[in-house]
Amino acid sequence: MECEQIVAKAQGEIASAQSSAQLDGIRVKYLGKKGEITLLMKQMGTLPKEERPVFGQTVNAARKAVEESLTEALEEIVKKESAEKLAAERVDITLPGRKQELGALHPLTQVYREVRDIFLSMGFDVNEGPEVELDKYNFELLNIPKNHPARDMQDTFYVSEDVVLRTHTSPVQVRTMLSQKPPIRMVCPGRVFRTDDVDATHSPVFMQMEGLVIGKNIRFSDLKGTINTFIRNFYGEHVKTKFRPGFFPFTEPSAEVDVTCTVCGGKGCGACKGAGMIEVLGCGLVNPVVLENCGLDSNEYSGFAFGLGIDRLANTKYGITDIRLLYENDVRFLGQFV
Amino acid sequence: MLAPYRWICDYADVKSDADTLADKMVMTGNGVEEVVKLGENIQNVVVGRIEKITKHPDADKLQICMIDVGGEDLLQIVTGADNVFEGAYIPVAKAPSMLPAGPIKKGKLRGVESFGMLCSGEELNLKEEDYPGAGVNGIMILAGEPAVGTDIRELLNLSGTVIDFEVGANRPDCLSMIGTAREASAADQVAFHLPEIKYDERQDIKTEDLVSVDIQAADLCTRYIAAAVTDVVIGPSPEWMRVRLREAGIRPINNIVDITNFVMLETGQPMHAFDASKIRGKKIVVRRAENGEKMKTLDDKERTFTENMLLICDQEGPIGVAGVMGGLDSEITDQTKTVVFESAKFMYGNIRQTSRGLGLSTESSMRFSKGVDAATTMFAMQRALTLINELGAGKVANGMIDVLNEDLKQKVVKVNAARINAKLGTEISAKEMQQYLNRVFIQTGIIGDELVCTIPAFRGDIYGMADIAEEVARIYGYDNIPETDALTHLRRGRVSDFEAKTDVVRDYLRDTGFFECVTYSFAGPQDYAKIGMDVPESVKIINPLGDDTSLMRTTLVPHMLSVVALNQNRKNENVQLFEVSRGYFPQDGEPLPHEVPMIVLAQAGSKDFFDMKGVVENIVRLASGAEIRCERADEPYLHPGISADIFVGEEKIGVMGSVHPDTMKLFDMPERAVIAQIDLEKLYAAEKPEMKFRALPKFPAATRDLAVIVDQETGAGDLKAAMEKAGGKRVEKVELFDVFSGEQVGAGKKSVAYAITMRSPEGTMRDEDVDAVMKKILKVLEKDFGAQLRQ
C-alpha cells in the first residue's frame, strides 16, 4: 500500500539525516502543507464514504509514525550537535587565569596581625604611643634612672638630655598605667630604635610588641598561662616552651622564654646554635617600683608584662636569615609572602 | 664574661661537666652565650725531640730534622728555622694536623719529603708572656724534658673549657669567678669555699710611711684602700695563674700586673698598682678633675677631663682616671721596686659617665659602672697581698690605709612566705624557701610565716619582696611553677580607630596588587636635596649612626623613591608599592614632636597619573566615604603638569603626581613612576558616614548625552561639578565618556562628552522635564566655561 511505502521511505530518510536542518526538510516534505502524507489525507474526500474511516486511521497512523521518528531523530541529533558544539568550544584549561595580580602585606605586618589577633581574642586592647619619647617614660619610671648600668642594655638614640627614640614600647605601658585605671589588659606594638649598625642580625629600627596586664592578684603562674597560650596559638600545639630566669629592670621576677626551634624541631641546628630552642620573648611580673612610679599601689595591684620582637618572630616563622631583607623592599622578597 | 671551668672549680666543688653546669646555670638565671672548648683549633700536635739534623742537599736555608715523636720510626720534617738543635724538645705538627692558621699536610720542600711542621709559639697562638720561650724568633724550644708524643695542648694547658656568661646588669657580683662559683654551687648543689686569706707583713715598714691618702670627693669614692709592697721582683707569674688569665681572655704581663688582673677576675673588684716611686709627694689625692685637665693614660693617649670626672692624683697632678685606667707615668715597669695597690669603691654612675665621656671602656670601668661592694673591696686587697706572698713577688708592708665612707651593715629584708606564694602562684613552704635562699647565700631565718633574710653585701640588687620572690622562684625552678589563667575571655580586645581604618586601606592595596614596604624612620639632608626641598625643621638625633640618618623624617617620599629605584634597577617591572609610617614634626614649646601617620604610594612603569588617582579615590572612599578634589600642585619633585594637591573638602590631605624627570635622575630611576603621599590623620578626621539602606528607585531613569567644546585648560572635573550643581536634585549621575582635541574642534580647544542620568522619585520623567534640566545645564556651561554645544 502506498501509505506504508511513504512511511518506510520517510523513515529511511530520517535515519540517514545528519542535521536538524535536514530533519526540518524531511518534516516539510512529508508533513508540511504540501507534504506527501498531508496530500494523502487530502485524497480522503475522493474516496467512498465507507472507506474513509479506515483510510483516515491509516494515514493518521502513518503521520504519527513519521512524527515520532522525526522527534526521536531530532532528539538524537540535537544531542549530537550540542556535543559537537561543546567539543568545539573546548579550551586549554592550563592557560593562566585572568586576574588582578595580588600584592602582599609586609611580612612584619602579617606576623604582627597574627600576634595581635591572638591577643585581641584574649581580651587585650591595642594601644599606641609616640616613637620619639621622654626619657622619663622610656627609662626613669621603668626603674632605669640616668646612668644606671641597665641603660647599657639598650643603646639609645638621644634627641636631647630628656628625649630619646624609644628603645622599646614600654613607655606605652607607662602612659597606659598613668592614664587608665586597672584592670588593664593591653598590647602595644610599634617601631623601636637602638644604635645598632646594620648587619644580618641587627637593625637600628625594628618592630616590637609588648603587653601589660594589671589587676588584683595577678600571679607569675598567670603570666606562664598567658604566654604559653599565645605561643601554642602562634607556633602550634606541639611547640614546647622553656621559662628561664632573666633580668629586666622593670620586671621582678623576670623570665626569658625559649620555644622549640622552628627550623629543626628541637634536634639542634645552625639556626638555634645547636640548642634546639630559640629565645622569643622576655617577660616578668611588673616590678613594684614601676607600679608605684606609675601611681599604682603595689600592695593592691600586681601584674605582668612581656615583650617580643616582631622581626624575630617573622625571621623564625619564615626562616629569614638576614634581617636586612625586611627593610630592603625588593618585590621578589615581598612577593614570597602573598 | 669568660669563666674558665677549671677556675670556677677552684671555689665550688662542681660535679657536673662544663656543658651540664652551663645548662643548670641557665635555668637558675645565669645566661650562657656559649661553652667554648679551647684548643680545638690545634689537632695532632705533639712533643718531639730532634734526634738528628742534616743540611738540605739543594737549599742552603733548609735543614732536615729526624724527630722522635714517640712512635717506632723517626719523623722527617724539613724546616727553615735556624734555632733548632739536636736534642731540642719542640712542638711537632704531624701531618695531617690542624693549627689555628689552618691545616698542615705532608709535602715536599725542594724535593725532600716533609711529614709535618715544627711550630713556633706564634703558630700555637702563644706569646712570650703566655709561656716562656714562646716569643723566640723561630721554633719554640720546650723547657725541660717532656715526654715525647705528649699532646702539646696537655703540656701547655691549651685545652681548657670556658663558659661565656651573659651577666645581667643587676648582678655585677657575677662579673667574677667567685660570684660565678657561688651561683654554680647553688645550681649544682655543691659546696662553695672562698680562697684563704693569709700573708705575712714586714714589721719594719708601714704602708703609711710610704704613702698617704686624701679623699676629696667622698661622695664619689666611698672606700679607698691602699697597701704597699716593697722589694718587688718583677717577673713572670706562675703557670697556673697565666693559664687562668689566658683562658679568661686576659694576656699575662708580669707578676704584679697579673695579680691585679687575677684578683679583679676572681673577686670582681678592679685593682690598680702604682709604682710608688712615681707618686710625687708620696700622696694620693682622690678628687674631681678641673675642666680641661690633661693626662696620658696607659694606652699612651692624651686624655682631657671635665669637672665631673674623678681622678687619682699625687701632689702635683693626675696619675690615673679613677676606675677607668691608670696614668702612663705611674705604670709598673721592670724597674719597679715598690708598689702601692689600690682597691676602691667608686660610684657606678660617675664611672659610667666618665667612661662614656672619654670613649674609654676597660675591664675595670665596666665593673665599676655596674657597681662593686665595699666588703669585696677589702677582700680583694687582702687577696692581692696573699698572692704577693704566695708568688714571692715582694714584701707586704705593715698595715693598710682604709678610708671608709659608708655603712657596712648588711641589709635585712622580711618577707611573708604566703605573699611570695600569692605572687608566684605556688605552694612552697616557708622551710623550702629558707633552703633555697640559703643556697644563694641569703642567710634566712623563719619567724612564724615570715622569712627574715640577711642580704650579703655583694647582692646590692635585692631590696624587697619581689626580689626575694625571684630568688625563691629561680631556685625552685620556673619549670615547676604551674600555668594558670587569671584572664576571663568575656570581651574581645579593641584596636584603635586608626588601626581599624588602616587595616582596610592595607587590605585594599594588597588586593589591588600593591606590596607593602617598611623603611627606616631616619632621614638626612641629602634626602631633602634629592627631592628639591630645604631641610625642614626636624627632630635631630644627637648620636646618629651617620649624617644620612641624623634626622627623623618628615616625608616618606625619598625612601619610597629609593625603593622604586632599587626595584627598577633589579628589573622588577611595574612595581606597585606603599608604606604606612610616621613623619615627625617638632612643636613649639613641646618636648615631643607631633607624629603624623602617613601613607606613601608608588606605581612604576606602565601606570600613569590616573591609575594613581583611581587608587587614591578608592582609599579615600574606603577610609572616609568622601570624594577628593584635585588642584594643581607645586612640588619640586613632581612633574608640574601631571601632579595634584589632594583635597577632601577644604582640607589638603596629600599630594600625588608623576615623578619629575630631574628627580628620576637623582634617584637613578630608569623608568617613570607616579607617587602619592597622604596624611592619614587628616584623611581619617573626616568621619565615614554610617552605612544606611536607601530604597531602590521605583521609576526608570532617563539618560542624555551632552558634548561641548571648551578651552583646553578647562578641567573636566570642574565641568562635572558645575553640571551636577546646575542640574539640581534630579541629576543622579554625570559621567565623562569622551575627551578629544584635534582639528575638528579647533586649536586650543577640546571636546568633552558626558552621559547625564536623571531620575525623579515621583514618576517616570517626561521628555520636556528632561529637556528643561539639560537646558539649565548647558546654559551654565556656556556662561561659566564659554562652552559650545557640539552638534
Image: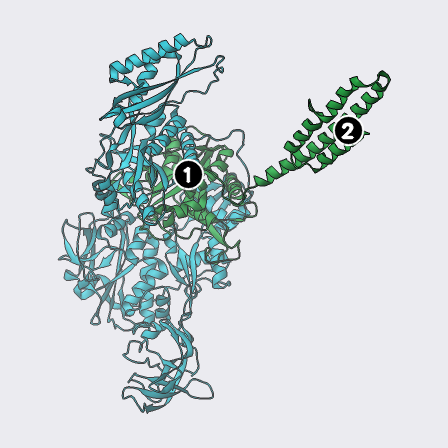
Tag 1: residue type?
Answer: Gly
Q: Position of residue A196 (x, y in %)?
A: 32, 49
Above or below residue A217? Residue B183 is below
Quarter of the image where one finds residue A286: top left
Q: Is residue B777 left or right of residue B45?
A: left
Chain letter, colour green in render: A
Chain B's shade in the image? cyan
Q: Which label belongs to residue A65?
A: 2
Residue placed at 78% from the left, 23% from the top? Answer: A60
Whether residue B598 can be seen here: yes
Residue placed at 52% from the left, 43% from the top? Answer: A228
Q: Position of residue A19 (x, y in %)?
A: 65, 35
Residue placed at 19% from the left, 51% from the top? Answer: B287
Q: CA distance from mark 2 to mark 1?
A: 65 Å
Above or below residue A234? Residue B49 is below
Above or below residue B334? Residue A62 is above
- Quadrant (top left, top right, bottom left, bottom right) of the N terminus of chain B: bottom left
Which residue is nearer to you in this view: B456 or B264? B264
* Total numbered circles: 2
Q: Are marks 2 and 1 on the same chain?
A: no
